[in-house]
Image (tube, coloured by chain):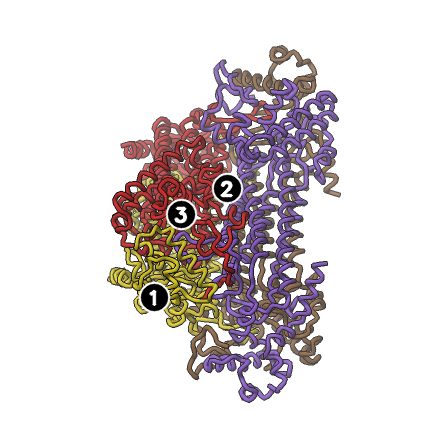
Chain colours: A brown, B yellow, C purple, D red
Amino acid sequence: MGGAGKAQDEGFALSEQPWGGRFGAEPDPLIEQFTRSLAVDSRLYREDIAGSRAYAKALLGAGVLTADEQQKIDCGLEEIAAEIESEALPPPSWGRVGVGGDAEDIHMAVEARLTEKLGPLGGKLHTGRSRNDQVATDLRLYSKAAAHDLQAAVEALETALLRRAREQVTTVMPGYTHTQRAQPVLLSHHLLAYFEMLRRDEARLADAARRADVSPLGAGALAGSGFPLDREALASDLGFGQASANSIDAVADRDFVIELLSACSLVMLHLSRLCGEIVLWTSFEFSFASLPDALASGSSMMPNKKNPCAAELVRAKSGRVAGDLVAMLMVIKGLPLAYNRDLQEDKEALFDGVDTTLICLRVTARLVLGLQFDREKMRAAALGGYTLATELADYLSRKGLPFREAHRIVGRLVAGALVAHKGLEDLTLAELQAASPLFLSDVRAHLTLEGSLASRSVLGGTAPARVEEVLAHVEA
Amino acid sequence: MGGAGKAQDEGFALSEQPWGGRFGAEPDPLIEQFTRSLAVDSRLYREDIAGSRAYAKALLGAGVLTADEQQKIDCGLEEIAAEIESEALPPPSWGRVGVGGDAEDIHMAVEARLTEKLGPLGGKLHTGRSRNDQVATDLRLYSKAAAHDLQAAVEALETALLRRAREQVTTVMPGYTHTQRAQPVLLSHHLLAYFEMLRRDEARLADAARRADVSPLGAGALAGSGFPLDREALASDLGFGQASANSIDAVADRDFVIELLSACSLVMLHLSRLCGEIVLWTSFEFSFASLPDALASGSSMMPNKKNPCAAELVRAKSGRVAGDLVAMLMVIKGLPLAYNRDLQEDKEALFDGVDTTLICLRVTARLVLGLQFDREKMRAAALGGYTLATELADYLSRKGLPFREAHRIVGRLVAGALVAHKGLEDLTLAELQAASPLFLSDVRAHLTLEGSLASRSVLGGTAPARVEEVLAHVEA
Amino acid sequence: MGGAGKAQDEGFALSEQPWGGRFGAEPDPLIEQFTRSLAVDSRLYREDIAGSRAYAKALLGAGVLTADEQQKIDCGLEEIAAEIESEALPPPSWGRVGVGGDAEDIHMAVEARLTEKLGPLGGKLHTGRSRNDQVATDLRLYSKAAAHDLQAAVEALETALLRRAREQVTTVMPGYTHTQRAQPVLLSHHLLAYFEMLRRDEARLADAARRADVSPLGAGALAGSGFPLDREALASDLGFGQASANSIDAVADRDFVIELLSACSLVMLHLSRLCGEIVLWTSFEFSFASLPDALASGSSMMPNKKNPCAAELVRAKSGRVAGDLVAMLMVIKGLPLAYNRDLQEDKEALFDGVDTTLICLRVTARLVLGLQFDREKMRAAALGGYTLATELADYLSRKGLPFREAHRIVGRLVAGALVAHKGLEDLTLAELQAASPLFLSDVRAHLTLEGSLASRSVLGGTAPARVEEVLAHVEA
Amino acid sequence: MGGAGKAQDEGFALSEQPWGGRFGAEPDPLIEQFTRSLAVDSRLYREDIAGSRAYAKALLGAGVLTADEQQKIDCGLEEIAAEIESEALPPPSWGRVGVGGDAEDIHMAVEARLTEKLGPLGGKLHTGRSRNDQVATDLRLYSKAAAHDLQAAVEALETALLRRAREQVTTVMPGYTHTQRAQPVLLSHHLLAYFEMLRRDEARLADAARRADVSPLGAGALAGSGFPLDREALASDLGFGQASANSIDAVADRDFVIELLSACSLVMLHLSRLCGEIVLWTSFEFSFASLPDALASGSSMMPNKKNPCAAELVRAKSGRVAGDLVAMLMVIKGLPLAYNRDLQEDKEALFDGVDTTLICLRVTARLVLGLQFDREKMRAAALGGYTLATELADYLSRKGLPFREAHRIVGRLVAGALVAHKGLEDLTLAELQAASPLFLSDVRAHLTLEGSLASRSVLGGTAPARVEEVLAHVEA
């Protein structure tokens, strides 16, 4: 017996809230506004209605509803979905402008509308169910769909990269380390590096989708439903791979949200690098590529400007998605089991992270497809910065000189050439032989972009034959 | 000469964008949608119009506008503000539903509307100005106002805490460390701890406001305006304390945004602790307080539940604001000077951080004012957990025993009392003297809540006289 | 030709650095100290030496080394490993106190020592290899091992939870939502909720290990090695599942580090909740459990205190690991391909995240095994807070009343009982029937903990039979 | 009476811990190792000993110690400081290798050593003190000193920037927005932008130091000391500006740590931008500057490379410090008052954030002083990208054309010049007049770098006279 609350006087039973039986007052308007989530979770109306339709079938199986009742509820819910979709405003705004009335959330809004339609029968739908398992179900359905959408958008970007790699399969550019020219590589090889990253992102999204693919419905508030629901049939009816094994865990954890946001954060990091390179490449200094006017923006003040704004924004939005991830990590920290209202914060962070990642994937694909590469500038740049030095050191190594010595000899050649304002390829055989007698006339073939490229013919290397092989494989 | 862009054919001058002179194509729809910020920055319409009205005066001073032109522009801008405010939808939604048309942002929307009204004269307003200094000005005006609003909301919560502290000035409760009962304290002393935290928060907000109080207007795109603007008069006209000293810095940095978000994050941390305590105190186990029904929520499934949902949400939203801070830190990281489009991400994070902190301050004040304390339960709890043990050890110390030995002796008394299921206050003098002959009959006065409280009479201690002194001081 | 560097005078070839051929000066001491990573990466000596031994075999296959040379290098490396391990100081400190001399990092330290032993032959080992592919290899070997260690520690904690769940299989406690008593559950069911979370953590760690299981060795600096290495044999020799498909990606990305830190962050979140509950349960107010003295700590001042310090620290360290994750997200943001020195920051964040998660898993397992539950207190608490209310509403639903009406009726009963300071189980049949005529004498069986528990018999519910079933399944 | 712990048998008084009176067992070794902080907090030995020496004086004033006792304790503490400093290993490692023995932390280590020296008298030092107020005092002393060190390092970097700005006062470079050439600016103006940022950083550090400048000593465990300490004298003796006003707040909050980490994060963001620009400027493509060999590093594989490693690492470490900040935000979230062991995590994050920021400031100053600018390349670049376009549009505006039209006309000129591969400065007067009859022969003076620069003569603009004025002012 007992209770934390002090006794109320006899006029307590005033609250009209659906949960208001023991409440002696209506919610304070500020508190009500603060705790209402309808403007945010109305976006889950499809998932919520699908969940309720399946749940009504389960209640039929459990003997709670008659076939006729279940039929009526099913039709009512179908109608509500149609009503929402016919609103002038798009569903994400539902709840913002009065649809759903003053309901606390999408779950209560749908139930209230159903009860308007069906009378007390509407009040049977929530039998043995809690918003705790209901919202977890909605969010898992959303997460699965979001992960699939994200995978499709990742694939579309992969396709864009492959198309450009195929087209530029022989374009030579300087490869960089430390933003310093390092060695010649193929542009196609460089683009395929991003392809590889995205493939891992796809796999991470698939893993996240798999772990979201568990139905909490039937877990009740935390202890399990008090009615004999066939939870596996219910899960299967909703397209879930399985039903959750523990009711407390089912309503209490949001690790599937955090895992999906982690996967999104990694996608965004990869995009931040690719778009950062687009910014560099389209700079006057690099001039490796330009954006078509339709993909760039101007300045309100400077008539000369053509700015890679979309690429910059994608780069920036990597911070936004990381912020969403941090928010959720901090929200969950230290919470006792099972459900806490803190979990309501999960939706905005997740929606924002998913929406941002999706649009950024699409924008990046557009930029990748639109980039106009300047092959001549890239090729010319590939020789600058003494990028053949490694090939020259390798040449000496192949003649038996320990690499560390070969490195030092070529380093000195570079230093001398810098002083003389020459390239390595401008050095005479005599000059080379003065540095090491191992240099013979065959060295000339190595002092070319093609020679250097061809030498990198290990698996995964930038040798044209290797890159062609990879392209052919992934295109298949 | 030159340029990163490849030559375009002669049909280039197609773009109708305000910055479109050198552009041969209209923006791609996806890119345009992605880079448009009107739905977000329309919220700055007041600041933007205020900035433009002041700017037109500066252009008058610089000889760019005639008095008549300036007058017309001023009236036009005033009308636009009125138009926006008379829209059916609240300003934050401006731009979402067509107001502002297809403008890229609030700056262009206002200029476009002005030009509709005034013809080519509208095109004079942007003389010597860039959106780079314009948006920085808007955001600094917003930040100053936001910091002041936040300070006021912090003060309101301070007032709420003071009111409750005054009312509960003599209520005794157990003080905790490690969530274990430690020593008796006054509830008022506990509430005043939060008062102190909030005072520091106020000071941090004031510091952030002070550093935001610098006008960038006249910095142009990055190099300074090309017209002889009196930037100090302009700053003063807008209520800024000073004009920025370096045009590149003025458009490139957003440290004032991050500083404000840092201050908000600390406010939110403090609220997360206070609201976390409200959750604990209203638990059945603690039962130190209850929330009036109007400040609590029920369960959709469990008729017995009365949940401190608002307190939980405040606690959770500390993660959200920290996420906004992280987002901005990451956005700025590594960007070259001066303006980059990445900076456009500043607004949503800042708006969200400020809005969230404001509402959470208000909600917490409501909860603090509403809490119904159960003084009897608190007082009873204050004795549990052997909370007088420190006073007992202090007693021995005052008799000359080294504290470390006194600690050990009392520790053993506690251990013995635990076995005997007694409180320390239940021990007989003989039992105490068996532990140490220093215990005399005067020890009895120390084995009371009042004795223990009175002993903590150092500055800042929980002794009633001290707390009264502090309260009187801060109430003054 | 050309170069960003200005010409140096003829005395340029001064640097004794292994990469110093083109350098005309030794590193500035401050810069050298700042860029040196030996104190951190010396921890990777095992991985580095294993990688080099395998690499020497690959060089034999590529015709760079003779069998005799490879043999000498192999023995030399084996000796160096033994030397490091025989140092007085443990390997993590290697590099801090002079071992490895003034080498820049573990790679150069090992090469330098090898060259001391073997002369110029030591300089052949780095043929066709770069520190870029070398360090990525070391870090992937480390990550795989770390993920496996973490999985083992997760499993040990799972085992601890299962042991306690089995032991407490029939212990009843109040289940909570919003830190308010909600419905009775079994303690075993509650502990199994954590078991489920940890199983998902294990799976995430396995996924991270799988994606780390790719050998970058042979990628060279970024373009692929210039020597005909059999990279697949090399990968297999080191125990990797496959060789990387793109050399630029191989040296440029650290998504495997971030993925592992994300998985660690989720483990830590779960531990923060479990340890947060240990803090609550061992509080005076809950008193559901106590920690044996050996697992708690005292206070320097208060002789009465017994504090759950280890649990608090685990909870706190969830922030630390999230900080490591954020650090890495921000480090990688916006970096152009391929390798940048920024990546050197990966190691401390990863080591710290892994070490922290490992020790926290072990400490939590110790706490779980040590907790002394107080079954009587838990059972008594399970009835407080009107936890049978849902069962009572379900009872009415089972009699055909729409649940929403049943909820309201029971809510009013709760409100009345609160006023009367009674429990629901104390109400007479007449009192119940005054609220609803559907209450019959069989209701009495439902107004018990056992009745309520037994009703939650859906899959995943807390009904004793269900929990026993789950336990039997996972113990198998 | 009562207690969460179950009764222990009579053999309970076994623990030798200084707080072990009520403990019946020694700590479990794993738990002891996990909760020990000596290896980390030994770094605070100076602050701890200073705090204890001042505290002993306060105990003299409170009548707890005699003058002779205080004298002995003072000498003993002085000796301990000397002992620690004479250790072979530097103080930060104290505790790692046995000094301090098996003490839990620096506080207990010092007390234990004092007791070795003075016998039971050593046990008097902790009278009326708790580690809770002691560690807060230590950490505030450290924070103040750290903030001052950081301010000094910021000032040193400011000085370096001023020196280079003075030296390069007339060097022209392209100013950038969106990493696209925008308008000509002075290099000195660009460097002074960073000077401004750092001045704000200094002010933030000063604010953080000010808020840390409050003495918690005398707050006891949470309720205030039980002895009549003169807390204001104590504060003043330790160099604090004031004593804390509330004992619970004094031991419970760490907002001063977070504020200092926030200020560090902003310093690091600014450094990440400056060092990111150093990376860009020293790239082959920009070639605006080079690093002297002593400030760059080479590649283990590529003999041609000269990498700006130190600049890259500074950029990366901005992530590390942000990670420290996030860690602390998450640690504090939701903790009840007062002290919790979670707070022990504050030190590593703070030390790491401060150390990292300090070294990065020093390294960046070295890089700034060492950069070798290539004025010719910068000047040549300043004309590329049609950077005079704004000046041309301003010219038309000055003749009365609405700016928006002027912008469009010049935009078309740029587009035409791009097609013709000409610069704007290459256009003939006739060509200009074909675009607008407002162009007269005086336009020629504006089509120069000097003309464009001179026009930006507003306060804060890049006009040489303005920049000279600012420099003269800040140098004064």
User: Within the image, what quadrant is residue A62 found in?
Assistant: bottom right
**Chain of the residue that carries numbered disc 2 in the rendered image:** A
Q: Is residue A385 left or right of residue A211?
A: left
The reply to whether callout 1 and callout 2 are in contact (CB within 8 Å) is no
**D56 up-or-down from A11: above or below:** above
Measured Cα–Cα span from mark 3 to mark 1: 37 Å
What residue sits right under mark 1 in the picture?
B448
**Chain of the residue that carries numbered disc 3 in the rendered image:** D
Measured Cα–Cα span from mark 3 to mark 2: 40 Å
Residue C209: horizontal and vertical position, in percent? 66, 45
Disc 1 versus disc 2: nearer the observer: 1
Q: Are the residues under marks 3 and 1 on the same chain?
A: no
What residue sits right under mark 2 in the picture?
A307
Residue A299 can be seen in this image? no
What residue sits right under mark 3 in the picture?
D257
Judged from the image, the secondary structure of the residue bearing numbered disc 2 is: loop
User: Within the image, what quadrant is residue C56 found in?
Assistant: top right
Judged from the image, the secondary structure of the residue bearing numbered disc 1 is: loop
Disc 3 versus disc 1: nearer the observer: 1
Residue visible at 52% across and 20% down in the picture: C23
User: How busy is the neighbourhood of tag 2: few (under 14 within 10 Å), some, or many (20 plus)?
Assistant: many
Picture quarter with the C terminus of chain A: top right
